[in-house]
Image: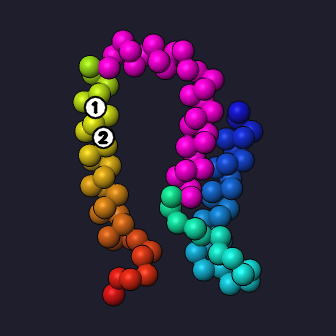
Amino acid sequence: MGLMSLYVVGLIVFSISRGRDFIEIEDSWFYGHWWYTSTLLFVVGMYYAYYKEGITRFFAKYYRVVLPVMAAGFVGSMYLSSYLDYKFGYTPDRS
C-alpha cells in the first residue's frame, strides 16, 4: 500500500509538473483537477478497506462529534475551493 501510495502521489506531481498545455505531445497531461482528486481518493479507499473495522468503530462511537465537524469542514472547503478557483483557476472562459 505504501508503494502504491507513493506511485499515485508521484504520478499526480509528475502530471501537474508537465503543465496544462504541454505541446510536445498531442494529448495534454492536464485533464482537470477532478482527475487528480479522483486518483488520490483511490489511495484513501485502499487505506479505508485495510482499516475498515477500526474506522467504522470510531465513527459509530463518535458520530455525534464527527458529523458536525465534518459538515463544517465541508462547507468551509467549498468556500475555500470557490475562492481559490476564482483567484488561481485555469478556466479559459475568464477575461
Could you say where residue 83 lies in the image, as x and y percent from the top left?
A: 29, 63
Q: In this view, does 43 lie to the left or right of 32?
A: right
Instruction: Give the distance between the C-alpha atoms of the residues marked 2 and 1, in whole angstroms.
Output: 6 Å
- The image quadrant of residue 64 is top left
Residue type (three-letter) at the residue carrying disc 1:
Val
Q: Is residue 68 left or right of residue 89?
A: left
Could you say where residue 67 lies in the image, as x and y percent from the top left?
A: 29, 28
Kindly state the secondary structure of the residue where label 2 is placed.
helix
Res 73 label: 2
Q: In the rendered view, tell whether residue 78 sits above or below residue 29.
A: above
The magenta-colored residue range is: 35-63
In this view, the residue in front, 66 or 2, is: 66
Question: Magenta segment: does it hold 44?
Answer: yes
* Image quadrant occupied by the N terminus: top right
Res 69 label: 1
Residue type (three-letter) at the residue carrying disc 2:
Gly
